[in-house]
Image: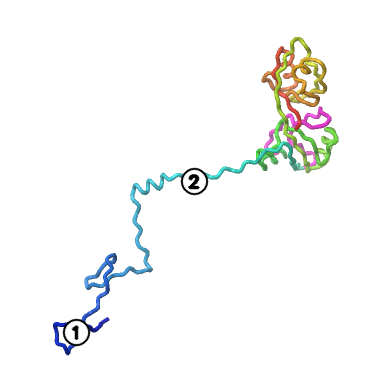
């Protein structure tokens, strides 16, 4: 590119041609002839390798923690549906049917494949079936423990209503008195069912204990009804744990 401009060192009648030079960019390299060398826009500039301290700092950055799983509020009463491989299949629990109103879950049978274990593995902890829970309805049947037991055996889909137990403790001093309790229990059980409360140590020291409550522990001892009865008979003072349907 050429342009015309005046120069006072030559003849007035003759124009002098000088070459126009591009303005230099101090940040760009200059070739020997004075032209600025511009980088090819299609070529990415080389990235500087981070220094060792920078690498170490990047590695030491804390990894963001995963947000905690939302808490599921534990209900006192909920429904669960259990699927049996066949109508005759066991659900995977041992039931106490001594109370005519409810079924009491004495223990869960661990097989790895029972309908209850399958159900428990599919729900939150707050909705799992546990030992010590009460069954208050089976497929809509609530008439009695006997009728609920029969309903379980009639279908391979069992919809049950579970009630968590209300657990509480009492200290009873016999002071030479009888307990004043009518107790009922059966083989394979894990508690003593109170069938009646009369005059005695219980009416004096624990008047709020009532028919239908269950004795779960005596002075820290748990186990079969026989073990619990032995613990009651062998001590003048009793620290007792109880269960009641919610």
Q: Secondary structure at mark 1?
A: strand
Circles 2 and 1: CB atoms closer than 8 Å: no
The segment highlighted magenta reads: 86-113
Q: Which mark is residue 64?
A: 2
Task: Please tell me whether residue 13 is drawn above or below residue 42 in the rendered image.
Answer: below
Q: Percent x, y for residue 91?
A: 75, 37
Task: Please tell me whether residue 188 is drawn above or below residue 111 in the rendered image.
Answer: above
Foreground mark, 2 or 1? 1
Q: Percent x, y for residue 124?
A: 66, 41
Q: Is residue 44 left or right of residue 138?
A: left
For the point 81% across and 20% down, the residue is 197
Dominant secondary-structure state across the stretch colored magenta: loop
Q: How many marks?
A: 2
Q: Percent x, y for residue 24?
A: 26, 70
Residue lying farthest top? 176
Q: Secondary structure at mark 2?
A: loop
Q: Which residue is mark 1?
A: 16
Residue 52 is one of the magenta-drawn residues: no
Task: Please tell me whether residue 139 is drawn above or below residue 6 in the rendered image.
Answer: above
Task: Please tell me whether residue 2 is drawn above or below residue 78 in the rendered image.
Answer: below
Q: Is residue 217 left or right of residue 196?
A: left
């Amino acid at each position: 590119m050429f342009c015309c401009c005046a120069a006072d060192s030559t003849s007035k009648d003759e124009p002098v041609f000088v070459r126009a030079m591009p303005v230099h960019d101090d940040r760009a390299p200059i070739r020997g002839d004075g032209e600025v060398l511009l980088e090819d826009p299609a070529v990415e500039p080389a990235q500087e390798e981070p220094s060792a301290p920078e690498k170490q700092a990047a590695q030491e950055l804390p990894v963001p923690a995963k947000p905690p799983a939302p808490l599921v509020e534990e209900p006192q009463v909920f429904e669960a549906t259990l699927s049996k491989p066949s109508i005759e299949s066991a659900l995977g629990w041992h039931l106490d049917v001594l109370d005519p109103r409810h079924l009491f879950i004495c223990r869960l049978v661990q097989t790895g494949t029972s309908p209850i274990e399958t159900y428990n593995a599919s729900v939150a902890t707050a909705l799992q079936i546990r030992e010590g829970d009460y069954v208050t309805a089976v497929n809509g049947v609530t008439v009695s423990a006997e009728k609920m037991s029969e309903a379980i055996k009639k279908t391979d889909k069992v919809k049950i209503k579970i009630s968590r137990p209300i657990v509480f403790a009492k200290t009873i001093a016999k002071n030479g008195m009888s307990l004043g309790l009518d107790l009922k229990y059966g083989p394979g059980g894990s508690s003593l069912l109170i069938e009646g409360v009369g005059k005695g140590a219980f009416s004096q020291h624990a008047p709020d204990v009532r028919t239908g409550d269950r004795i779960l522990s005596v002075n820290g001892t748990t186990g079969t009804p026989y073990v619990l009865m032995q613990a009651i008979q062998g001590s003048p003072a009793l620290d007792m744990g109880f269960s009641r349907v919610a």
